Amino acid sequence: MTEPAVLPPPPPPVHDELELLLRLGDDRLVLGHRLSEWCGHAPILEEDIALANVALDLLGQATLLLRRAGEVEGKGRDEDALAYWREAIDFRNCLLVEQPNGDFGVTIARQFLFDVYAVVTLDALARSTSAELAALAAKSLKEARYHVRHSGEWILKLGDGTEESHRRVQRAIDELWRFTPELFAADDVAARLAARGVGPDLPALRATWETQVLDVLHRATLTAPTGASHSPHLRGGRSGMHSEHLGHLLAELQIVARSHPGASW
Amino acid sequence: MTAPDGADANRTVAAQAGATAADGEWPLWEVFTQGAHGEPHEHAGSLHAVDAEQALQNARDVYARRGGVASIWVVPSAAITASSPAEAGPFFDPGEDKAYRHPQFYKVPRGVRGL
């Protein structure tokens, strides 16, 4: 490794707060969109409404977070500009939420892993030294607690259900587990935010998350993969390096706004 | 926490109520919602769910998602005993022409609410 001639100056704190808001907001925008893909296709009408309901909650959270991100950025971009006019490389969501819906078991497994993560991180964020962030987190936390009740109950039903539902949801957990280390990986931005008390101390939250997830998996007669993969290529979402799925998702999410710039409806 | 306690008990309730449909459809539940504390629960509609917890969650999403609800009851439809439409005459007509059974001859003092 060559010696750097000059260390780059640390970015201003506003940069970090903007990053945090984009990470939180993009997680919810992307997952909300994924869930909305179920609209009209869920196994039964009641669950169709339930998934759309969660999607709308997430979209509402994303709206507030991205609006705040635009304010912090100070370049006159609102939540719509951030949602519709950024490219995949600008998105800061984790890789887990952009994974395709798969079958109902995959959707529920992805949702459950994220919902517990959301509760754990929002709970910490509600004590942020940033009053705006704390207020946004406290508001979202109520919704997240309901989401985990819904997806957790489905994990129990599918895991402890029929042979086929057990097999499918176990396979989903096995496939998605490799995306969970990214949730708790702290890069420089996250570390600085945690040190200032603005953002959650992510690595410290993993144990809480795992306890809650494993408890439900156990009761659902499911198992988590051991020796979880920490392959570097399964991270990168927080710095804009996404799986190929995000581009397709954004194409659908952004096409109308981009085809009719400035239109309102 | 993540999943409600008593889920097993809920499953038992549904089973005891004989709510399991033979046609492969999930059991039917009747939903009652209360608009504000103190008001009666009123029938809001019905839905399908495999157990009471899921019925509650579905009821919340179908009937309470736009707010205005303080409490929800869910009841297995099979647990409800209804009067028979064929018996409606003997059952209800005798009550129709007895005005003296109505408390309409009392004057309600001004300022009394909730009657």
Image (cartoon, coloured by chain):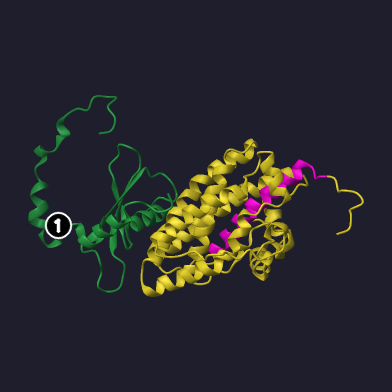
Chain colours: A yellow, B green
Residue at screen point 23% across, 24% down: B109
**As displayed, is residue B79 above or below residue B20?**
above
Viewer-proximal residue, A71 or A196? A196
| Residue at left offset 75%, top offset 41% | A13
Magenta residues: mostly which secondary structure? helix
In the rendering, at what x and y percent does residue A9 appear?
A: 85, 45
Horizontal and vertical percent for residue A160? 37, 66
Residue A152: say if magenta: no
Taking the view exactly as shown, the residue that stands out farthest to the top is B110
Q: Which residues are magenta?
A: A10-36
Q: Is residue B20 visible?
A: yes
Q: Is residue A264 left or right of residue B67?
A: right
Q: Residues within 10 Å of mark 1 (few under 14, many from 20)?
A: few
Q: Find disc 1 in the rendering and name its residue.
A: B83
Indicate the chain on which mark 1 is placed.
B
Q: Is residue A11 left or right of residue A265?
A: right
- For this rendering, which residue is in front, A99 or B58? A99
> In the rendered image, which quarter is residue A219 located in?
bottom left
Let me know if residue A18 is in the magenta part. Answer: yes
Q: For residue B84, which quarter of the picture?
A: bottom left
Residue A6: x and y, percent?
Answer: 90, 49
Residue sitting nearer the eye, B106 or A179? A179
Is residue A70 visible in this depiction of the protein?
no
Residue at left offset 73%, top offset 46% = A16
Relative to B62, say whether A248 is above or below.
below
The answer to which image quadrant residue B107 occupies is top left
Q: Position of residue B36 (x, y in %)?
A: 35, 39
- Vertical position of residue A62 compared to residue A260: above or below: above
